[in-house]
Amino acid sequence: MKTILAIHTGGTISMSQNEKGEVVPNDDNPIADQQVILQGQINLITDEMFNLPSPHVTPAVMLAIKQRIMKAIDEGIDGVVITHGTDTLEETAYFLDLTLPNTIPVVVTGAMRSSNEIGSDGLYNFRNAILVAATDESYGKGVLVVMNDEIHTARYVTKTHTTNVATFRTPTFGPIGIVTQNKAKYFQELIRTEVADINRVVKGVFLIKAYAGMDGELFDAINQPTTNGLVIEGLGAGNLPPQTLPAIQRLLAKHIPIVLVSRCYNGVAQAIYDYEGGGIQLKKMGMILCQGLNGQKARIKLLVGLSDGKHGEKLAEFVRNAIS
């Protein structure tokens, strides 16, 4: 019988509606003690680490979860499931994917409907996540996200709808597997990248989204001694309005790493256009074009790289290519 550690961190999956119909945290997690769903086939150990709505989750919380999982690995646990609020679930999952060894299955799940709503999906997703963590084929897959019968990689999955139970999707590539007949079934493999075993997290890593008519005001506002890095969601294939360039150059002159991704839902940032503010010029200026990640994921990767002490070309290589 496999032993799975369930780490509960809060979120809708642990909440209920009050008499006013408002979804609020509970003092007691309604799914924390649910051995009955496993029919005696899996030994479930529960750790209620946090009770946080996901907007309250910080990189420091993510690091604490990582350290708890490392302890469980040392103790010989067979797999880990983390329940988490959905708003920042993809960021925590990717942080863990970047910082944990690719050994035992680690699965993150959540819910779009609170425990006392009609059609609540929390307990169902929790059970499926446990089954995935206990499946032999889940070893070596990196951190996984299991929601709505689908298995996604932490690297590419993203929340696409505010309330729909099918909110978690993987643009371009799709899920790597499904949950069927009480086990995980896989159809794709994920190419691995370098793992950073960090024990601290830096601050001052920002994310800014580009828009038509943007100037340098926001970039000058974050040009502070405490700024360690910046991710920009650029236009199209990775372009910016020309009015932003002087302020961006001032940041680069201070050796602040700047990562460029696309604000588009699909596709990757590429140095295609050769005009003022085009991707070719931005790359020549020293910006790092990151392919395959959205803005929030690229920020997590930059933050992890900086926390691991990477800088210069080593940092750029770590952040640049999320596909291979």
Image (cartoon, helix red, strand yellow):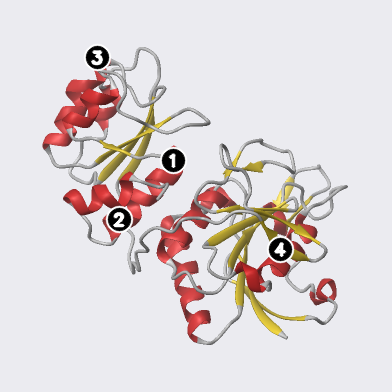
Q: Nearer the viewer, mark 4 or mark 2?
A: 4
Q: Secondary structure at mark 3?
A: loop
Q: Which residue is denoted by mark 3 in the rendering?
A: 275
Amino acid type for the residue under numbered disc 4: Ala
Q: Residue at x 38, y 24 (%)?
A: 210
Q: Position of residue 161 (x, y in %)?
A: 66, 35
Which type of secondary structure does the marked residue at label 1 adopt?
loop
**First of labels 4, 3 by sequence position:** 4
Q: Which comes before the other along the chain, label 2 or label 1?
A: 1
- Numbered circle sitting on residue 101: none
Q: Specify the label residue 292 is tagged with.
A: 1
Structural distance between the alpha carbons of marks 4 and 3: 48 Å
Would residue 157 appear left or right of 253 to someone viewing this image? right
Q: CA distance from mark 2 to mark 1?
A: 17 Å
- Bin the neighbour count of mark 3 within 10 Å (Cα to Cα): few under 14, some 14-19, many 20 and up: few
Q: Which residue is mark 4?
A: 184
The alpha-carbon separation of the residues under discs 4 and 2 comes to 32 Å
Mark 2 vs 3, N-terminal side: 3
Mark 4 or mark 2, earlier in chain: 4
Asked if residue 217 is positioned above or below residue 45 in the image, the reply reads above
Q: Nearer the viewer, residue 185 or 117?
A: 185
Q: Are marks 1 and 3 in contact (CB under 8 Å)?
A: no
Q: Quadrant of the N terminus?
A: bottom right
Q: Which residue is mark 2?
A: 305
